[in-house]
Amino acid sequence: MIVEQALLQVAPGRVADFEADFVRARPFIAASPGFCGLELRPSADQPGTYLLLVRWDSIDDHRIGFRGSDRYQEWRALLHPYYDVLPGVTYFKDAILT
C-alpha cells in the first residue's frame, strides 16, 4: 500500500465551503480503482491548513488511474479553486514501525 500526502492551504474565509465541497468531491476519488481510503485533517494551529492522506494500492493508481480520469476533472473543479497554492504530493511506503 502507498500513502499519498498533501498539505492543502485553503484561502482565508473559504474553509466552511471547502469542507462542504470536499464531502461532495469524495465519491469521485473513492470510485477510483486502487483507492483504499482517505483522511482529511485540519491543522490544530494553522487555520485553513489541512493534511490529506490517501491510501492507494499503488502510485500508478493515483497518478495514472485517478489523475487520468474524468473523476479527477470533477474533483479538481470542486476543490482546486479553494487553494492559495496548488499542493505538492509525496508518496510513502508501508510503515516500518507502528
Image (spheres, grey):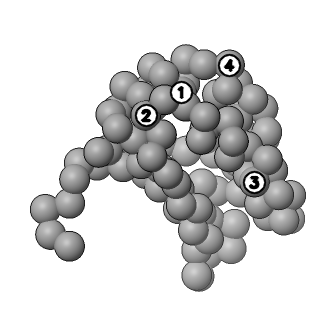
- Residue designated by label 2: 34
* Amino acid type, mark 3: Val
Residue at the (20%, 60%) spot, across then down: 95
**Disc 2 vs disc 1: which is toward the camera?**
2
Task: Specify the quadrant of the image occupied by residue 40.
Answer: bottom right
Instruction: Please tell me whether mark 3 sits on a helix, a strand or a loop.
Output: helix
x and y percentages locating residue 56 in the rendered image: 40, 41
Q: Residue furthest bottom?
A: 45
Nearest to viewer (mark 2 / mark 3)? 2
The amino acid at mark 2 is: Gly
> Cα distance, mark 2 to mark 4?
16 Å
Q: Which residue is mark 1?
A: 66
Question: Which amino acid type is marked by label 4?
Answer: Asp
Please say if the residues under marks 3 and 4 sit with CB atoms less than 8 Å apart.
Answer: no
| Residue displayed at 22% across by 53% down | 94
> From where the camera sits, is residue 34 visible?
yes
Name the secondary structure under disc 4. helix
- Helix, strand or loop at mark 1: helix
In the picture, the disc for residue 23 is: 3
Q: Is residue 45 above or below residue 24?
A: below
Whole-angstrom CA distance, mark 3 to mark 4, is: 18 Å
Task: Look at the image and tell me in which quarter the C terminus lies.
Answer: bottom left
Dot 4 surroundings within 10 Å: few (below 14), some, or many (20 or more)?
few
Q: Closer to the N terminus: mark 3 or mark 4?
A: 3
Whether residue 12 can be seen here: no
Q: Residues within 10 Å of mark 2 (few under 14, many from 20)?
A: many
Which residue is denoted by mark 4 in the rendering?
Answer: 70
